[in-house]
Amino acid sequence: QVQLVESGGGLVQPGGSLRLACAASGSIFGFNAMGWGWYRQAPGKQRELVAGITNVGGTNYADSVKGRFTISRDNVKNTVYLEMNSLKPEDMAVYYCNTYPRVINNYWGQGTQVTVSS
């Protein structure tokens, strides 16, 4: 059984920053060999890929977050991070992590809420 626990969300004003973390635990083999991604789902919208990082550190970003968000990984801690700067109201969503580029449906966690509001 794999557990992905997202943390770091919260309420921030437009233009502010947050750092999300996703810690993987349980029967997870080969964390280092897998790509990982951050996904988000806003109310009434489909879940979408925000950023992905391959097993060798290559990154990919949604156009809407390029230049503002940075994904990184710590293979010792089995943790993936998402640094979010210059946050906009349209970034408000529940953020999840999962494998990348293809998700594993059983891996979805509870997510972490990001609220951008003045």
Image (spheres, helix red, strand yellow):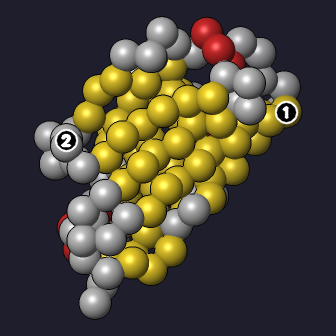
For the C terminus, which image quadrant? bottom left
Whether residue 14 appears in this view of the structure is yes
Front in this rendered view, residue 94 or 115: 115
Q: Which SS class for mark 1?
A: strand
Q: Is residue 66 left or right of residue 40?
A: left
99 relative to 20, above or below: above
Q: How many marks?
A: 2
Front in this rendered view, residue 71 or 29: 71
Residue in the picture at 32% in, 71% down: 16
The location of residue 91, given as percent across then percent down, is 28, 63
Q: How many angstroms separate mark 1 from mark 2 (CA)?
A: 32 Å
- Few, some or many residues within 10 Å of mark 1 (<14, 14–19, 20+): few
Amino acid at pointer 2: Lys
Residue in the picture at 44% in, 62% down: 18
The residue under label 1 is: 26
The residue under label 2 is: 66
Task: Give the residue at the far bottom of this rendering.
Answer: 118
The location of residue 97, given as percent across then percent down, is 53, 42
95 relative to 76, above or below: below
The location of residue 103, given as percent across then percent down, is 49, 29
86 relative to 109, above or below: below
Residue in the picture at 51% in, 28% down: 36
Whether residue 102 appears in this view of the structure is no
Front in this rendered view, residue 44 or 85: 85
Label whose residue precedes the other's in the sequence (1 or 2): 1
Front position among marks 1 and 2: 2
The location of residue 11, given as percent across then percent down, is 45, 80
Residue in the picture at 80% in, 35% down: 25
115 relative to 36, above or below: below
Amino acid at pointer 1: Gly
Q: Which SS class for mark 2?
A: loop
